[in-house]
Amino acid sequence: MIRRSAREPSSFPIHLVLVVCAFIVLTPVAWTVAAGFRTQISLLMGSLTFSPIWANFQEVLFSKTSDFLLNYRNSIIVGVLSTVLCVAVATLAAFSLNRMRWRRWVVQVFLAWTLIFHMIPPVALASAWFTMARTVGLENTFTGLILAHAALNLPMAIWLMSVFIREVPRELEEAAIMDGATTPVLLWHVILPMIAPGLAATSILTFVFSWNEFAVALTLTMKQTATVPVAIAKYAQDFEIQYTQMAASAALAMIPALIVLLVAQRYIVKGLTQGAVK
């Protein structure tokens, strides 16, 4: 039998910390989902036991006064298209920054500016986005919101894709160029297959951030183009807050992100750790 060395640290404290962190993260989520199955009176009274009901989900999904399914469709359209646009531009920008003959200070200034832009809260830019969209006639359109979300997530995507492209061996690129590969062929057949996990991780994060964005979506959309976060906020009215319906819609809003994360979990882990270990 192999005995644990006296000097080997115990894993119990690490597991305990992980359990506590998981409890802190999952408790609000579980409370929100449970609130979707409660009546308004039961929730406000704070009773621990309750009889689950489906009325809140039926009201959110099938009520004649609810546009939640339309908002769901809008979020999927905006999330997918803004992710495709954002990741495509970020990949080209990262390739240019790391492989083209830019002066070093130009690259550093550009990356510093993207970091500063990413640190600005989206709500601080909401009025500017609305003014620009109205000037060019893109307010209350999917195009305006897609461009806004792509721009908001572009700094993060550029930084991530820069890390992944930087790790691609230059010898592979040089060999492809010697064989006569053009830049589009080099990107499609050499770079992209090498950074596929990183590409997946960046796409998933970009989609999740677009799905959850609220301030700019509230400013640029109206009833027919509103997204899920905007729809959830409508349950908080001047004279009444429909907590249980808000909780039900929030529970439904978690589904796409959970599906994406569960399906592509290994790609996220592999992609995010690709630049840390060679």
Image (cartoon, rainbow, N blue to C red):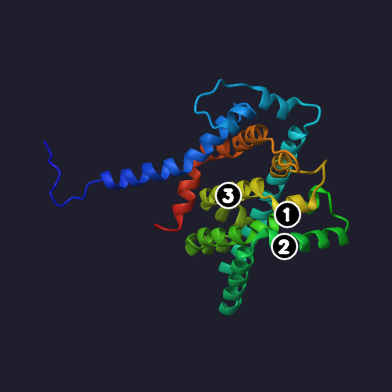
Residue 212 placement (x, y as % from top left)? 64, 47
Residue 239 placement (x, y as % from top left)? 75, 40
Badge 1, how many Cα within 10 Å: few under 14, some, many 20+? Answer: many
Residue identified by numbered label 3 = 205
Residue lying at 32% horizontally and 43% vertically, measured from the top left: 15
Report the quarter where the N terminus lies: top left
Residue lying at 68% horizontally and 45% vertically, measured from the top left: 79
Q: Nearer the viewer, mark 3 or mark 2?
A: 2
Badge 3, how many Cα within 10 Å: few under 14, some, many 20+? Answer: some
Closer to the camera in the image, 232 or 171: 232
Badge 2, how many Cα within 10 Å: few under 14, some, many 20+? Answer: few
Secondary element at tag 3:
helix
Q: Quadrant of residue 130?
A: bottom right
Q: Quadrant of residue 240?
A: top right
Label at residue 125: 2
- Residue type at mark 1? Val
Label at residue 216: 1
